Image (cartoon, rainbow, N blue to C red):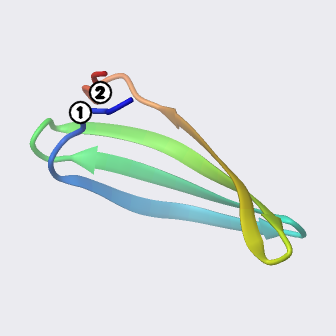
Amino acid sequence: MILNTPADPAFTSLQYALGCGWATVVQTGESRSYDARCQGATTLEIRYGRIARETLYYTSTDVPFTL
């Protein structure tokens, strides 16, 4: 699967949360060429000091992703 995304994405991290075996980053993404914004969170499951799983959640009503 290939996503056609804006050519100038910019991500700003808003919050970090760390725990025993996990980490979460809440971020905002935007594109000047499409005048669009989205917000999301990345959750990491950490095992033996390495990332075992990454899950991304996002919400957007105006970022033009196409498949």
Q: Nearer the viewer, residue 49 or 11?
A: 49
Q: Earlier in the sequence, mark 1 or mark 2?
A: 1
Q: Residue at x 29, y 27 (%)?
A: 65
Label 1 residue SS: loop
Q: Position of residue 22 (x, y in %)?
A: 80, 62
Considering only vertical position in the picture, is 53 above or below 39? below
Disc 1 residue type? Answer: Asn
Binning the other alpha carbons within 10 Å of mark 2 as few (below 14), some (14 to 19) or many (20 upward) gives few
Q: Residue at x 46, y 42 (%)?
A: 39
Q: Position of residue 63 (x, y in %)?
A: 29, 30
Q: Residue at x 51, y 36 (%)?
A: 58
| Label 1–label 2 contact, CB within 8 A | yes
Q: Residue at x 24, y 38 (%)?
A: 5
Does residue 32 appear left or right of residue 27 in this picture? left
Q: Nearer the viewer, residue 53 or 43?
A: 53
The residue at which mark 1 appears reads as: 4
Q: Where is residue 35, by image quadrant?
A: top left
> Residue pushed farthest bottom?
49
Q: Nearer the viewer, residue 48 or 21?
A: 48
Pick the quarter of the image with the N terminus: top left
Pick the quarter of the image with the C terminus: top left
The residue at which mark 2 appears reads as: 65
Task: Tell me the tag on residue 61.
Answer: none
Count all numbered tags in the image, as a single digit.
2
Disc 2 residue type? Answer: Phe
> Residue pushed farthest front?
1
Q: Position of residue 53 (x, y in %)?
A: 72, 53
Considering only vertical position in the picture, is 21 above or below 10? below
Label 2 residue SS: loop
Binning the other alpha carbons within 10 Å of mark 1 as few (below 14), some (14 to 19) or many (20 upward) gives few
Q: Where is residue 36, by image quadrant?
A: top left
